[in-house]
Amino acid sequence: MCSNEYHWVCGVDEAGRGPLAGPVFAACVILDPASPINGLADSKTLTEGKRNSLTLAIKAHSIAWAIGFASVREIDRLNILQASLLAMKRAIGKLQVTPARVLVDGNHSPRLKFPVTTIVRGDSLVPEISAASILAKTARDAEMMALHRRFPRYGFDQHKGYSTEQHLAALKIHGVSIVHRRSFAPVRELMANEKAPES
């Protein structure tokens, strides 16, 4: 474990801003310089198997890590950006150690008591953010698999809630579930069409 906590850097990223269903997740990671992890990269560029193996390595060898999320109801109430920032703040709040500074992927960050730097494309540039992106992605994918078992008609195991042809077709056939984001245009428009009177 790194002995100088004054240099601990925490990377933060989210997963699931774009989908039509399910929570948005965020993760934060403080890597241990004494235990480097090979293969860290933007989670979107990795295979599912590689993400899963890296998730185990990150959890085993990091100084600290944590995961947070914001619910579908919070996404609809706050908007997806603010819900993503809330998920990040919740993840950071679970850390068992205090970081010296926080690096957040993108150009928005939650309000924190630590020095914060936003980095566009940080998930492909900064190892700590890459690690956070992997944890957030695998945590969200696991949640979508759990939702698939509750709502198998929508195919969450295949598209993870994203706006695919399969998902949109299932929405038209089965309607909107309680885990769909009603503030997102395709879902909102479908609900409006269902309520519209026949001409």
Image (cartoon, rainbow, N blue to C red):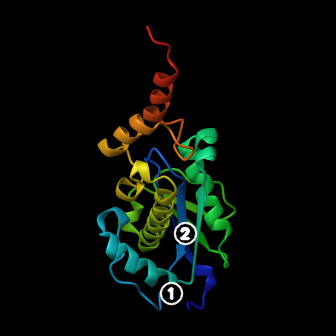
Q: Is residue 58 above or below residue 21?
A: below
Horizontally, residue 111 falls left or right of residue 119, namely: right
Say which amino acid is labelled 2: Cys
Residue drawn 60% across the image and 54% down it: 70
Of the two numbered discs 2 and 1 on the same chain, state the one appearing first in sequence.
2
**Whole-percent x and y of residue 72?**
58, 47
- Give the residue at mark 1: 60
Label 2, label 1: how many angstroms apart (C-alpha)?
Answer: 14 Å
Q: Quadrant of residue 120?
A: bottom left
Residue drawn 63% across the image and 53% down it: 86
Residue 161 visible: no
The quadrant the N terminus occupies is: bottom right
Label 2: which secondary element: strand
Q: Quadrant of residue 156?
A: bottom left
**Whole-percent x and y of residue 52?**
39, 76
**Whole-percent x and y of residue 162?**
39, 48
Label 1: which secondary element: helix
Task: Name the residue nearer the viewer: 171 or 53.
Answer: 171
Horizontally, residue 156 falls left or right of residue 99, namely: left
Residue drawn 64% across the image and 59% down it: 89
Nearer the observer, disc 2 or disc 1?
A: 1
The quadrant the C terminus occupies is: top left
- Give the residue at mark 2: 28
